[in-house]
Image: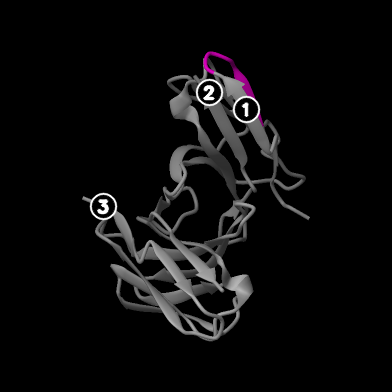
Amino acid sequence: TQLLEQSPQFLSIQEGENLTVYCNSSSVFSSLQWYRQEPGEGPVLLVTVVTGGEVKKLKRLTFQFGDARKDSSLHITAAQPGDTGLYLCAGARSGYSTLTFGKGTMLLVSP
Amino acid sequence: DTAVSQTPKYLVTQMGNDKSIKCEQNLGHDTMYWYKQDSKKFLKIMFSYNNKELIINETVPNRFSPKSPDKAHLNLHINSLELGDSAVYFCASTGGPGLTDTQYFGPGTRLTVL
């Protein structure tokens, strides 16, 4: 059983479309991070959210942490080909010393 | 300048061989990690070192032996390689001990065991 479930697994869209990807769990997380991984590279941190209900914006990307801190979403407005990559969520739980990663959402944005 | 670097980028070897992967970070971080990413892109922690000392070993087979000669380096030696060891291995580092700190990942080493 995967602790952090990400959906969808794959998403292929056209440039200019909007999209939302989800990261869900039955466990409570003290914080949650979103990373983007491009082919042949390591993941790069996009954002960290720590407060239930928190919303953070990074240009066209909007991140939300659920009120109960069990889920998070990433919304991209007017997607561009440069947004293509694997989006990973990673959560930290109280009492655990490592991050737990989801399996990721592979996003392909075509021109 | 590359913050976290790994060598080699690609490694193809036969079953039963022993191989090493090297990692260096120039960020002045105290904590370094090894992760394994399988073919389904699942990223799983293997080891964590803080200031050259092992603090986390996530039930990794003892064929895997990390070594940290100083806090800027964390190498991974693998004995008796098996087919299931084929994966991409990522080194990462963080500036603080907390899990909200940014993890800086290296570019990965793609290991293929034939």
> Judging from the image, what secondary structure is the residue with disc 1 in?
strand
Residue range highlighted in magenta:
A15-21
Residue, disc 1: A12
Q: Are marks 3 and 1 on the same chain?
A: no
Q: Are marks 2 and 3 on the same chain?
A: no
Which tag, 2 or 1, sits closer to the chain's start?
Answer: 1
Chain assignment, label 1: A
Left or right: B83 in relation to A49:
right
Q: Quadrant of the C terminus of chain B?
A: bottom right
Residue B58 appears anywhere in the view: no
Residue, disc 3: B2
Classify residue A64 by image quadrant: top right
Residue type (three-letter) at the residue carrying disc 3: Thr
Q: Are marks 2 and 1 on the same chain?
A: yes
A89 in relation to B41, above or below: above
| Cα separation between marks 2 and 1 | 8 Å
